[in-house]
Amino acid sequence: MITTPQEIITRMPASVWQPFDDPLDSGWAVDNFWAHWGLFSVGIIGFVLLVVMGFIWFERRFISPMQLRIGPNRCGPFGLLQPVADAVKVMLKEDIVPNLADKVVHFIAPIAIFVPVLLMFAVIPVHEGVGLIPDLNVGILFVIAVGSIETIAVFMAGWGSNNKYSILGAMRSVAMMVSYEMPMAFAVVAVVLVTGTLSLQGIVQAQTIPFALLLPMAFILYFIGALAELQRTPFDLLEAESEIIAGYHIEYSGMKFAMFYLGEYGGAIIQSALITTLFLAGWKGPFLPPFLWFMIKLFAVFGMIVWIRATWPRVRIDQLMSFAWKYMLPLSIVNLLIVALEVIWFEGDAVTWWLVPINIVICGALLTGWATFFKLRGGPQVES
Amino acid sequence: MALKTDLVTLNIGPHHPSTHGVFRMRVTLDGEMVREVEPMFGYLHRGLEKLAEGRTYTQIIPFTDRLDYVSSMQGNWGYCLAVETLAGIEVPERAEYIRMIVSELQRMINHMLAVGFFITDLGAMQTPFLLMFREREKLVDLYEMLCGQRFLYNYMRIGGVSHDLPPEFFPAVTKFMDEFPSYFQEFEDLLIGNEIIQARAIGTGVISAEQAINYSMSGPCLRAANVDWDLRRDAPYSIYDRFKFDVITGKNGDNWDRYRVRMEEVMQSYGIVQQALEQLQEVPPGPVKAKVPNLLRPPVGEVYVAIEAPKGEMGFYIVSDGSIAPYRWHVRSPDFINLGALRDMAIGSKIADLIATLASIDICLGSVDR
Amino acid sequence: MSLKPVGIGLMQGLFVVFKHATRKRITEQYPEERLTVSRRTRAQELVWDPGLCTGCATCVKACPQGNLKVTTSVGPNNNYIVEKFENDEGRCIFCGLCVEACPYEALFFGRRYERSQYSRGELIADKDEMSGDDKERSAYFRPDLYDDLPEQTLLIYRKHKKII
């Protein structure tokens, strides 16, 4: 039974604190614990806020040529200051709390949605040996665990607002996020099986081949799951504009709304960073410095998400659930089985170019084969 | 143990992103399932029918723009046709062709917008919609060249049209007609194979042929329910008997069929415009408006004339007492009547399907509420 | 049961959208880039020619909104002197029936379209404002003006610009 903070620290694995014991090893970590903590906390908050602004600008500028328009171009060069202007506007707005809202829950929800994002960033590796906790030995488990808090925050917002639209959105979100955690986790387990480590730093280092090629099935499943976790098209049901207007954050305004926005885009950063780390070899890359590689991959993944958002419509709630449980979950389990067999076959060293074409073929066959048994279409089955 | 559940009454509209104006639905929900839909309208009611009783026959034409403002030309045409039938006015042939061309172009605009709205209401981030808007924008430029405004044309007059086609209209419309099929193919590539759209649209919002007839539906919604009925072919008005075109019908009367019927009708209209442009070359230039007195006094009597507007059968019922203003002016607006079937289409489906079904009916609140 | 390839339509959609992203933009940056309106434009003002107007008030009779106000008095040669000629542009629907009806071609449409004001009262255009010298006249129902006006910019012919 853990009772005191000291006990937590003493029970934590030694590797969590290792960089502080031997700070000169990495060359980056500050030897004073509190200085290290302060520096990286501020650094992470600043990084997240800056990249959120970058993402907002990037999304708007990237979607607009697809829709044959220009996008924001008034504030600053290329509209770069548009997110700043938006932030100032949103901070000056009146904060409205509905009369019959559950005031406490209504107040806590925007905080609860943004904090997990910051927490998760503690373990994302952007460089070798850099981070608040540079090499947490259970990093991926931590990320999955903390990421689940978001579901509760969304439901708090929906429930606390005392609005029918928001409760509809919140109910959808709980159903959806719980379902999609499962195939995502299985996809991550496939990666862990191959690398043999839960540490994100270790996963990056193990990727002599980007796992997007080595484990295409896990990559696709994780990407789809990430779209669902991010509430992005085609899974943006919980804030479906044309149906339930804004979903769970319909009753929020001002800075509280901005927190939801931050949480949403912060989540986009986290999921893009996780995809980068797990499947695209993280900060690794030739010629350019690691951090730059990380950012390039981050924006590439987000660009793909935005591209999808610009093109596809959204699915219906029952289709969404059946897609998670009938299509993605069986496939992820089959994928796990195949990867496990491969790991046994290659005696633990499955990161070989041999497996790349084999796995791509298996992935295509599985996706196509399962699709013949599975129909996204609900309702009466009619021929088109 | 069964959980106790309750029905929730949700008010969708009048200010809601996907109610196409100020339409309101009172929906009774069981979780996500729709148990009851009660459409309510009248938020945009301007009393046009009553206002028209105090206007001369010419002064009513601007009002017909404001009925179905997505396809104003068809409103103009239906009204002018009704008055011409009532007063026995012969329209010059050139004017007939001009009317035909602008109206069929208008049908293309309307159907593309309807499909764009439909896809947007399915949740696409307005990209298909904006791509369709580009084609509309090209045509709207041409309408501005014709009659000075882009939206509320007021182009047709009793006995013809207000202006002849300007000389620069023909090269522009030819260029448009040349480019259009390739752009249209892009829309098809973008939408027709999309599994999500198929999953969302096939089998939702179904209405049977019998029900559709009983609800007195018309237009693409009726044809999607596999009823082969098109006023342009079955009761040809104006010069529709001179053109070859197919009447597109669907099979199941679901959202997918309504979407497909619209898309294919765009190409049929394209064919009609092409034939009309060809035939117009042989029509000698001349007056585009018959001699009609400024203050028209039709003989005492009544008339009902219906045209196949993009949204369905748009009818005008005029009672004349021999004075300069109609005694009674009534509009049978197609989307108002099609909307009546929304309840039967939507009950038992999810909210998302209710929204999609509403979009697939293609309503325009200007003509629903009048 | 045949094998059904999945996601082909979805990928095709992504490709079409990407193709559009590589095209040049078609929107205009409004305050800097302006389009030329149609020669027959029915833009947001009426232009009145005091020299041609006889004060017959046919335009008033033609207006479906009852929007035009004309007051006349009898002049020395037993003609009308127009004392007041007013159009409330806030209520005008710009249908053009008055311009069409004018038997002396004294009423025109203007070509200006930036006519927003801060209060509704400022929208009422009186005699002096409607007959100002700075007014450009549209060729709506005035075909003799048609050829002198600049050509309308059409989207079909528009040279698409680079995305900035």
Image (cartoon, coloured by chain):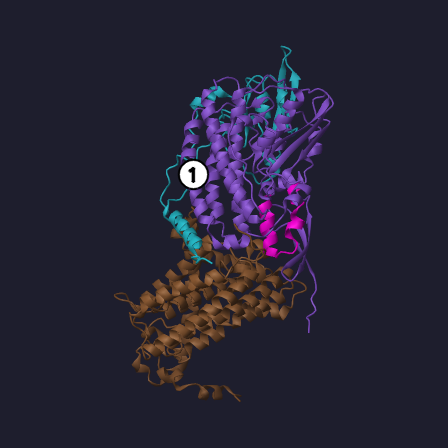
Residue with the most extreme left position: A287
Q: Categorize mark 1 by other alpha carbons within 10 Å: few (<14), some (14-19), many (20+).
A: few
In the image, which lettered chain appears purple?
B
Which kind of residue does numbered mark 1 sit on? Answer: Pro
Question: Residue at 48% of width from left, 29% of height from top?
Answer: B145
* Image location (x, y in percent) of residue B56: 67, 25
In the displayed structure, would residue A24 be above or below residue A311? below
Q: In the rendered view, does A378 fall on the left or right side of A25?
A: right
Chain containing the residue with disc 1? B
Q: Can the viewer see residue C36 in this picture?
A: yes
Q: Is mark 1 on a helix, strand or loop?
A: helix
Residue with the most extreme front position: C1
Q: Where the C terminus of chain B falls, by quadrant?
A: top right
In the displayed structure, would residue C75 be above or below residue A248? above
Provide the residue span drawn in magenta.
B337-362
Q: Colour of chain C?
A: cyan
Is A99 in front, or is B140?
A: B140
* Image location (x, y in percent) of residue A329: 48, 69
